[in-house]
Amino acid sequence: MTQDAFRKIALSFPDTEERAHMGHPDFRVSGKIFATLWPAQGLGMVKLTPMQQQLFILAEPEGFVPVKGKWGERGCTHVRLGAAGAATVRHALDTAWRNTAPKSLRPIDDDEREARKARKEKSGSLRARRALR
């Protein structure tokens, strides 16, 4: 994974822009950072949940490592660009983007579609019961 490939993937998500933060590039959705690049160190960073962080580290321990300190404890994860696989980095960036993007921008996945259907069915049955009273 190269810095340019990381950048290209990060910028492929809706409403994403590149800015600079503390002297290095960052990637934001609706003004909120979801990933950064540390060019001199050959690192990227993705904002994950602690559970997501553990899953990526288990999947590719040479490519993903927690950021030091409290940021890392909260899920911020370094991506070692030279060691991480392109497909896994794409998945990590997608996950970080979804964690940060407002709901209105996020595509609906199958789990959300099923949850919405269940809520709709439940509200319909409640209305029917109320009508019978």
Image: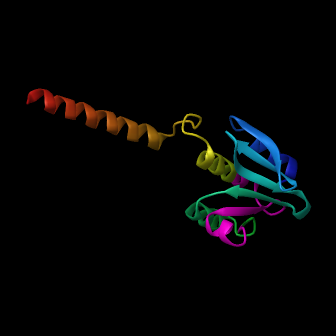
Q: Please say if 32 is above or below 116.
A: below
> Which sits in the foreground, 105 or 21?
21
Percent position of residue 99, x then y: 59, 49
Q: Does the magenta-highlighted stretch encompass residue 86?
A: yes
Name the quadrant of the N terminus: bottom right
Q: Is residue 132 left or right of 102 when viewed as pictured?
A: left
Q: How is this picture coloured?
A: rainbow
> Which sits in the foreground, 123 or 71?
71
**Residue 49 sits in which quadrant?**
bottom right
Percent position of residue 98, x then y: 60, 45
Q: Does the magenta-highlighted stretch encompass residue 72?
A: yes
Image point (47%, 40%), residue name: 110
Furthest residue toward front: 22
In this picture, which residue range is highlighted in magenta?
A: 66-89
Image point (17%, 29%), residue name: 128
Q: Is residue 16 left or right of 129 when viewed as pictured?
A: right
Furthest residue toward top: 131
Percent position of residue 87, x then y: 71, 51
Image point (70%, 38%), residue name: 13
Q: Is residue 98 visible?
A: yes
**Residue 58 sits in which quadrant?**
bottom right
Furthest residue toward bottom: 69
Q: Is residue 90 visible?
A: no
Q: Is residue 88 left or right of 127 when viewed as pictured?
A: right
